[in-house]
Image (tube, grey):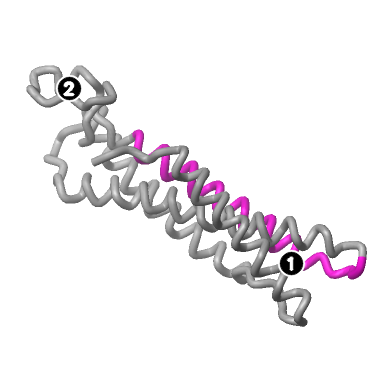
Amino acid sequence: MDSIKVSWLAVIGLVAAVAGWLVNWWATRNGFPAPSLHLSALLTVAVVVAITLIFGLRVRRWRNGKRDRPLSAILAARTLVLAQATAYAGALSTGWHLGILLDQLTLLSVRNNLGPVWGSLALVAGGIAMIIVGMVVEGFCRLPPDDNADSAETSQDGEGEYA
């Protein structure tokens, strides 16, 4: 399985930011509210981040030598996929809400409502947290290079294999 590509995270974030800005620009100029998630979505973000971290810490504990019981290969693979999905979803959410935030900042001179600005800032921070946790947990799933030295398969980019 390939690792998270930071360039893909940047592309996803940039495309989502442009889309978020355009949709917010159209919506606010036509009398609609800002198309952002409600702040209660941060609770969902926190739950996803916590679950990803819990599973990642289990894999890291096994990788670092606490092998009193075998690690399920399915659990390790699902943890890796969850970490990658968390990072990509975080990039999408960060980009979308950053685009909304940029457009909302231009509207501050004509209205005094800071609600969408603070909400977008909070959701951008939640998305950044998702990206960071996803990348860290993906690192937890990577085996050290010496663990698979006897293996005939090596990755093409010189990085370690996943647990």
Q: Is residue 52 left or right of residue 107?
A: left
Q: Residue at x 35, y 34 (%)?
A: 139
Point out the image quarter for the N terminus: top left
Q: Amino acid at mark 1?
A: Pro
Residue 32 within the segment the image draws in magenta: no
Q: Is residue 102 left or right of residue 140?
A: right
Q: Is residue 81 left or right of residue 12?
A: left
Location of residue 145 with respect to 113 vertically, above or below: above
Nearest the viewer among 62 and 158 is 158
Q: Which residues are magenta?
A: 110-139
Q: Residue at x 72, y 68 (%)?
A: 25
Q: Which residue carries the number 1 mark?
A: 116
Graded by Cα atoms within 10 Å as few (under 14), some (14 to 19) or many (20 or more), the crowding at tag 2 reads few
Residue 22 at what x, y percent from top left? 66, 65
> Which of the two discs, 1 and 2, labels the residue nearer the N terminus?
1
Q: Secondary structure at mark 2?
A: helix
Graded by Cα atoms within 10 Å as few (under 14), some (14 to 19) or many (20 or more), the crowding at tag 1 reads many
Q: How far apart are the two marked residues, 1 and 2, measured between alpha carbons? A: 49 Å
Q: Amino acid at mark 2?
A: Asp
Nearest the viewer among 52 and 102 is 102
Residue 92 at what x, y percent from top left? 51, 56
Q: Which residue carries the number 2 mark?
A: 147
Q: Magenta: predominant secondary structure element?
A: helix
Extreme right residue here? 109
Q: Residue at x 72, y 77 (%)?
A: 33
Residue 6 at what x, y percent from top left? 46, 38
Point out the image quarter for the C terminus: top left
Location of residue 122 with respect to 10 vertically, above or below: below
Q: Secondary structure at mark 1?
A: helix
Location of residue 106 with respect to 26 vertically, above or below: above
Residue 129 within the segment the image draws in magenta: yes
Nearest the viewer among 22 and 68 is 22
